[in-house]
Amino acid sequence: MASFSDLWEAYRLRHKRRYLLLRAIHRRRHLRSVADRTAAIRRDSLLVFATMRNEAARLPWFFTHYRAMGINHFLIVDNGSDDGTVELLAAQPDVSLWSTGKSYRLSRFGVDWVSWLLFRYGHGHWCLTVDADELLIYPYHDTRPLPALTEWLDRSGIRVFPAMMLELYPKGPIDAQRYLPGQDPTEVLGWYDAGNYTIARQDQTRALWIQGGPRARMSFADRPRHAPTLSKLPLVHWNRRWIYLNSTHALLPRRLNEAYDRLGGEKISGLLLHTKFLPEVVGKSAEEKQRREHFGRPENFDAYYDDLIAAPDFWTPHSTRYEGWRALEARGLMSRGGWI
């Protein structure tokens, strides 16, 4: 029998979910339609949702990766780009684009805007919510397109597919590399940390909280609890009554966050290859430190931005070469679960 505290927490989170949904519906007023091609969305379309700013260099490979995977339509919010991102996005025949100049931080770091689009267009679809620097991979992704995975998830009664963010980095200072638009970023960012991860379960949301990787050891060694959260729930068979609580780290209702086996077994999972550390991150970090839009208390992260502005070398003799999903599964960073 549930305790009073459990019942109260469930009530509180249900109230919060309704509030966040109403907030997202209200924030639709922030968005100006630039290119609306949503009429092309079919009942079986696989959809990507994203908010981005100044990502013209990343977008050619972003589209190459996700189109090859089987994504049918991209619903994207641009937040004040001035590098040609808007023009590039508007020219894509499978992109619907909205624009806003409102505060990213005050819109729950873009979650309000994406939540409205998920509410309006995502219901009944498998929806992948990612940043421009996140590339989803999963077991057999090189031979089985995303529709094969989502069909198996449907047959297995799985509505939420988890993926840890795996931060890739180069060998040498990050500003000493060369990246060309359209290039596979793993050709430049060929290394990762294989084993410095901590895992906890959040009692309130029942979500896993994973931290670690190169930023944790380089910028947050003296305050590990402030290190970036790497666990995400990016791929969801969406229902308009659901909402992301904070980024894609947790969902409401909270039962959706139990995308792991609490009895000690393994459920299927993937990875989001995080390609943040391309050479452009140095200049972007200087800009974002001034904009102060990326953290709830930006002043607490000035030292983190200073580290990136200094173009660090994340590589150590303990770094591991990125060699594809099978090696990542062998290291326990993803699992095929029962998908054979």
Image: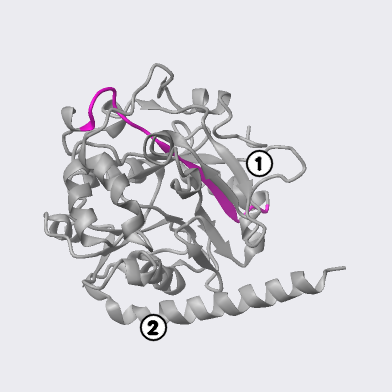
Q: How many marks?
A: 2
Say if the magenta span includes residue 171.
yes
Q: Nearer the viewer, residue 179 or 195?
A: 195
Outermost right residue: 1
> In the figure, 113 relative to 224: above or below?
below
The disc, 2 or 1, on the residue closer to the chain's N-terminal end is 2
Q: In the picture, residue 220 is in which quadrant?
A: top left
What residue is rendered at 26% in x and 61% in y?
292
Neighbor class of circle 2 (other Cα within 10 Å; few <14, some 14-19, many 20+) is few
**Residue placed under numbered mark 1 in the picture:** 267
Q: Residue at x 77, y 43 (%)?
A: 263
Q: Residue furthest front?
A: 222
Q: Position of residue 272 (x, y in %)?
A: 43, 42
Residue 26 tag number: 2
Which disc, if any, is residue 101?
none
Give percent across and percent down for residue 1: 88, 68
The magenta stretch is 157-174
